[in-house]
Amino acid sequence: MPALRLYKWAAIILLVVNLAMIALFFWTKPPHKTPLKGLNFESHKILELDDSQNEHFLESAQRHIQQIESLNAQQKTMLQEYFDSLVQPKDSVEQRSLLLKLEALEGKKIEMTLAHLKEVKSLLRPDQEDNFKIFYQQLLGRMLLQEKKTGPPPPEF
């Protein structure tokens, strides 16, 4: 009988330890980084912006993001229409016209991004211009996907 009592207490203790481990696991879950678009969250550090500059930068960045998202939505619709020609044949003139519109849309996105970067550069003081080069290189790396670091995915809890 004493062996049975020992096993009973051992099972209870192990159950309590397991429940405590599970509770601790969920309570101490590390916060996930929020996926932010672009370099907005790092820009004030890289460019060493003061509060006023950072506010203007964030307004400009938000405006730029909205413009690009609007153009991306248009582009998505046009691409869908362009590739629908595989299912529903279209006139080659109409197809070419759609392709030219898509090219113009992509050009507009590039021009908007350049204008945004010029606006950001105009916000800077002369002593911050060296930081703009660093910011620009990091941004260009992200835009061209040169610095894509693929590591293991974060653990899901």
Image (cartoon, grey):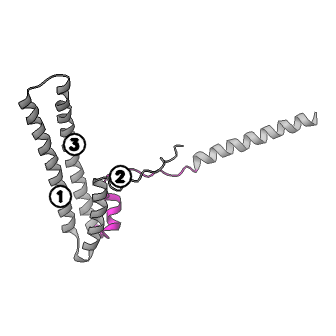
Question: Which element carries disc 2, helix, strand or loop?
Answer: loop
- N-terminal of the pair, mark 2 or mark 1, is 2
Which residue is label 3 attached to? 72
Which residue is label 2 attached to? 36
Give the amino acid type for the residue marked by disc 3 in the picture.
Answer: Asn
Select label 2 or label 3 by which is in front. 3
Position of residue 27 relative to residue 125, above or below, is above
Which residue is label 1 attached to? 114
Determine crowd level at label 1: few under 14, some 14-19, many 20+ residues with C-alpha closer than 10 A.
Answer: few
Q: Which residues are magenta?
A: 28-52
4 sits to left or right of 108: right
Q: Is residue 45 magenta?
A: yes
Determine crowd level at label 3: few under 14, some 14-19, many 20+ residues with C-alpha closer than 10 A.
Answer: some
Position of residue 80 relative to residue 21, above or below, is above
Position of residue 129 relative to residue 98, above or below, is below
Q: In the rendered view of the protein, which quadrant contains the C terminus?
A: top right
Q: Is residue 74 magenta?
A: no
Residue at screen point 51% across, 43% down: 156
Residue at screen point 83% across, 39% down: 9
Give the amino acid type for the residue marked by disc 1 in the picture.
Answer: Leu
Residue 136 position in % (x across, y down): 27, 63
Determine crowd level at label 2: few under 14, some 14-19, many 20+ residues with C-alpha closer than 10 A.
Answer: few
Judging depth in this view, the residue of 33 and 80 nearest the camera is 80
